[in-house]
Amino acid sequence: MTKLSPYISRGLISTKTVFNNLINRNINPKNVIKFIQELAWRDYWQIVWKFKNIDQGIKKKQNDVNNFEIPENILNHKTGIEIIDQSIKKLYNDGYIHNHVRMYIASIVCNIAKSHWKLPSKWFYYYLLDGDLASNNLSWQWVCGANSSKKYYANQENINKFCFTKQKNTFLDKSYEELISSNIPKQLAKTKNIELKFSFEHKNDLSINKNLPTLIYNYYNIDPLWRNNINSNKILLIEPSIYKKNPVSDRNIDFLIKLSSNIQNIQIFLGEFDELYSKIKDNYVYFKEHPLNYNYKGLCDSRDWLFSNNNFYPSFFKFWNASKKELGL
């Protein structure tokens, strides 16, 4: 685990920056191809987001849905499956879960408890320090079959193998055939609706030099090197409408603000873009391209992608096979 994901998600560094760092260290890309594919997956999900509505199943609706809530024993980390319960505690405490365990939890929630993917994915996004809407939503959809040809299941044997545990006699301790055909286990039968709230408060007190351009930073771009060669107003924009639809925890906002301290003289503005724009429209306004910036006005810079190929492909490996030659793979 590199623990780079929160910094990539917040745009402090890019997938391309990480790859270039490997090259600068004389690491042969062919020796770390799995790691590079993980970087490529991140960019792939982002490209899908540019072309598709990720708030709904991009291939089909999730089938066999029993409820639109979350099992209480998932929320309370009392499933009885040790690695799952420990990881949910870690999510609450640290904002991090290993990628394999994220898939296990999604599979338990969507395919064993038969919960619809939407609310559980919001719950994950709220707490994950590396929360990225594209990676998060589309991964949940992939697990539940709304973005894949079939649902993903993991039984106890699989979890033991990859998590180095030896647990037995859980509701997952079955063959895959038995697991797929089983009724909802009693441990997951009771579900709960949850309300996730964004609670950041800030008193705006901007000081704008109208003779300088303005750079707009946000939850997905906190890059301290972006246009750092020009003298400019620098504003971290926190739009309540964005966070009302997709709330994040106080810890995640604190992390964002802490990262923003790497940008000299940055100011925070809590409000909508149009409100901010009315104060800065006489300047050149710069921002980085992102699907959540659809309402921004000004000069749009491209993100720093791993590949120059930003076309849509219906599967990751079609995207990978069409792009990997750029990296000498």
Image (cartoon, rainbow, N blue to C red):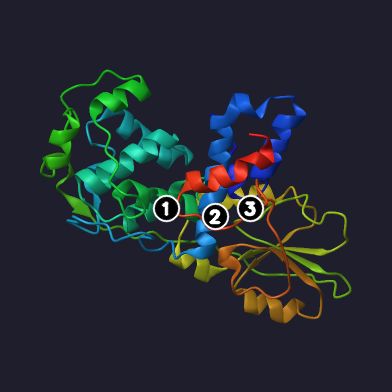
Q: Name the mark on residue 46.
A: 2
Question: In the depicted view, which residue is nearer to us: 14 or 318?
Answer: 318
Residue 219, compared with residue 244, is above or below; it is above
Q: How much space separates mark 1 and mark 3, taking CA atoms?
A: 20 Å
Q: How much space separates mark 2 and mark 1, taking CA atoms?
A: 10 Å
- Quadrant of the rendered structure where residue 221 is? bottom right
Q: Is residue 2 visible?
A: no
| Callout 3: SS | loop
Q: How many marks?
A: 3
Residue drawn where x is 26% and y is 58% of the image: 193
Determine which residue is flagged by label 3: 309
Classify residue 231 as left or right of residue 245: right
Determine which residue is flagged by label 1: 138
Looking at numbered disc 2 in the image, what kind of residue is underneath it? Answer: Gln
The first of marks 2 and 3 along the sequence is: 2
x and y, in percent, of residue 57 in the image: 35, 60
In the image, which is nearer the foreground, mark 1 or mark 3?
3
| Mark 2 surroundings: few (<14), some (14-19) or many (≥20) residues within 10 A | many
The first of marks 1 and 3 along the sequence is: 1
Q: How much space separates mark 2 and mark 3, taking CA atoms?
A: 12 Å
| Callout 2: SS | helix
Looking at numbered disc 3 in the image, what kind of residue is underneath it? Answer: Asn
